[in-house]
Image: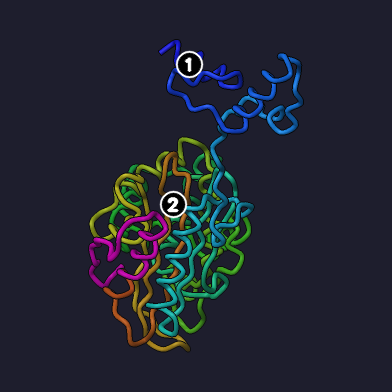
Amino acid sequence: MAPVLACAALSMVGCARTGVTEPAALKALSQQAASTGGSEVAVPSMQKLAPPSPLVAAQPSPPPQCPADSGWSCPQQQRFTAAADYISRHVSGQGYLSVVFTDRQTGKAWRVGPTQHEGWTASTIKLAMATDLLRRQRAHQITLTPTDRRDMAAMLHSSDNAASDRLWARFGGEEMLARFRNQYGMTRLHFVPGFTAKTYWGFVKCTADDLAALLNYAFAQLDAADRAYLVSAMRGVAPNQQWGVWAAGSEQRPGNKDGWSYETDAYGKHWVTNTIGFAGPGERYLIAVMYQVDPGGTLAGGVQAVSDVVALLFGVPVPAHITVPAPDG
């Protein structure tokens, strides 16, 4: 191989016998040089033939639908588009579905739908209760007994209403809701009027932005040990909560607190299917989804819709595999 390579390197002075064809322009120049007795001949064009520059891989421009300055990767932007398209096709005109998807690493949040629309919290408010109990215990403001701890675990695991009632009666009331608003960022949270038990945890409304604020507080402000407790509890929920954020897929190690209820308000009699939680390495992504289902909709349909939206946000095929809960959460 050495002679051939040397020949290639010396192609400017002619090396046709090695099998490398001498370019016609160079051949003419060689003949001209011979006729002048070997004196220098100007080579105005060939003098510019510098050694080839190293090849540099072309950097593809992001597709038009993936703005480079958005702060999100192109695949994630495409997942956002898929989720938004799903909502437009399956939910538009059939209720109020809103999503807040937050990247804890960058601090950026993506929103779709009416994230300031006030809707029933259902049992998602139980995560606020657990957050409040853990924070106050850590601050030595309350003492959680073993029974209280069991109730909190049941409230998170299976969304146990009786356990939630006991904790609300012992530590709750209107003062608890005020802390949710003033300390945890749930500024639009409020009791719904018209009920005999005016300050019951189950008679409250908030927005998807409020639930996102609660998640942000729990993951940024709680003591690390208390946050670890919530992560473990939300990863270990019972089958009746294995939908919603759960649809991110086991590879994402999700955890969630779901809420579902049948409510009556000016919108009519309708189902509510909400899901809040986390997914991704190091619980990187926080997800809050609220769906005030159309009065003509069903519990199963609402559960499927919010689960499919989350699945699309993580590139999981839909329809998502879900467990539809009994209608009492």
Q: Main secondary structure of the magenta part?
A: loop
Q: For the residue labelled by badge 2, is the local secondary structure a helix, a strand or a loop?
A: helix
Q: For the residue labelled by badge 1, is the local secondary structure a helix, a strand or a loop?
A: helix
* Residue 44 position within the rendered picture, expressed as x and y whole percent measured from the top left: 75, 31
Residue at position x 40%, y 56% from top? 167
Q: Is residue 113 above or below residue 138?
A: below
Residue 91 belongs to magenta span: no
Residue at position x 57%, y 62% from top? 186
Q: Amino acid at mark 1?
A: Leu
Label 1 with label 2: CB-CB less than 8 Å: no
* Residue 140 position within the rendered picture, expressed as x and y whole percent measured from the top left: 54, 40
Residue at position x 50%, y 72% from top? 205
Q: Is residue 141 visible?
A: no
Q: Earlier in the sequence, mark 1 or mark 2?
A: 1
Q: Is residue 237 above or below residue 31?
A: below
* Residue 189 position within the rendered picture, expressed as x and y whole percent measured from the top left: 55, 68
Q: Is residue 10 above or below residue 293?
A: above
Residue 326 belongs to magenta span: yes
Residue annotated with mark 1: 5
Q: Which residues are magenta?
A: 304-329
Residue annotated with mark 2: 130
